[in-house]
Amino acid sequence: MAKIIDGKKIARDILLDLKSKVDKCDKKPGLAVILASDDDSSKLYVESKEKKSLALGYKSCIYRFDKSITQGKLIQLIHELNADKGTNAILVQLPLYKHLDAQQILELIDPRKDVDGFHPINVGKVSCGLKPYAYCCTPKGIVKLLKAYNISLAGKNVVVIGRSNIVGKPVAMLLSNENATVTLAHSKTKNLKSITKEMDIIISATGQSKLIKADMVKKGAVVIDVGITRHYNGTLSGDVDFEKVKEVAGYITPVPGGVGPMTIASLMENTYELFLEQNK
Ligand code: NAD
């Protein structure tokens, strides 16, 4: 039976530590969040980010827009936030309304305030093995979870399933920087099971409910489930057939309560680190 990786607890410890550091600061970190979408999940994510940042004593400001927002107005706001000394971190909640060009907006954020680590300068730094201004939140959270459970990465065979710019690709880069041997699989990968079966660590970030079945997992492997599927009755499930896979795996993350809380803890930590860097 697998050991359950308790992301909630590790995230709580990170937030408690942050709170004690922030309490000692005269100035407080400033986080600006832009919500230009009517996506229900995005609204929930933004609310929970607001709640966490207020609990830490951050100066958090949410910019909510309806569908009439134009690309030009959003560009203007990014320029204003880049110039504002009280704003240390800028987050654009994705996806944006379809008429907006998200990539252009992300590239206009000052990389020193890019709290999500999505700017090409920050992505490029990580791919060069350098320290970015901020690491992407979910990948950073995953690496922290593995380290918190003393799961070594050097020389381990890892498959990352899903190659998005926000999870799959950056986590593959981070793990490679940690000396793991990384395979990056995706929807066009042939015979996924023949790959996953051989792996010491499986990280799945596809949004395909129960994609990872027990017969795809090597005995004792570490299984990290990033996927979130929202069901009509309000419950969540991940990419992994949790009940069956936990009988085979050595370690497993639950959904909810695994990677999700670590993503938000990393966001809060990134905000604090950007604040420190800008106030050196
Ligand atoms: P995405 O939705 O942009 O892309 C999905 C990826 O999965 C693609 O690269 C695709 O090739 C791959 N894929 C889809 N079906 C596949 C299959 N059958 N076999 C192999 N690969 C397949 O990815 P995303 O934005 O990274 O989101 C992925 C999931 O992770 C979603 O469920 C999302 O809600 C969740 N997510 C969770 C957190 C968290 O904090 N827990 C953070 C970000 C995203």
Image: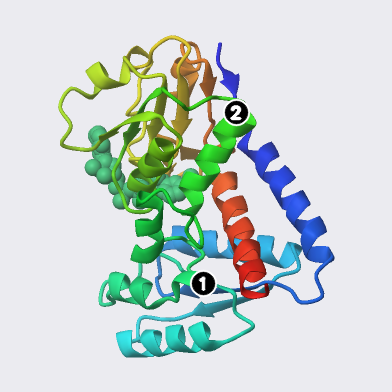
Q: Quadrant of ligand 1?
A: top left
**Residue 63 location (% of width, % of height):** 52, 80
Q: Residue tagged by mark 2?
A: 5
Question: Could you give the CA–CA distance between mark 2 and mark 1, rounded to whole angstroms?
Answer: 31 Å
With 233 as the anchor, is 108 left or right in this view?
A: left
At a point 42% along the width and 22% down the height, the residue shown is 156
**Residue 84 or 51: which is nearer the viewer?**
84
**Residue 117 location (% of width, % of height):** 45, 60
Q: Quadrant of the N terminus?
A: top right
Q: Specify the label residue 113 is tagged with.
A: 1
Q: Is residue 273 above or below residue 258?
A: below
With 80 as the anchor, is 190 left or right in this view?
A: left
Whichever of labels 2 and 1 marks the residue nearer the N terminus, that label is 2
At a point 36% along the width and 40% down the height, the residue shown is 172
At a point 80% along the width and 70% down the height, the residue shown is 25
**Residue 132 location (% of width, % of height):** 47, 58
Residue type, numbered disc 1 = Lys
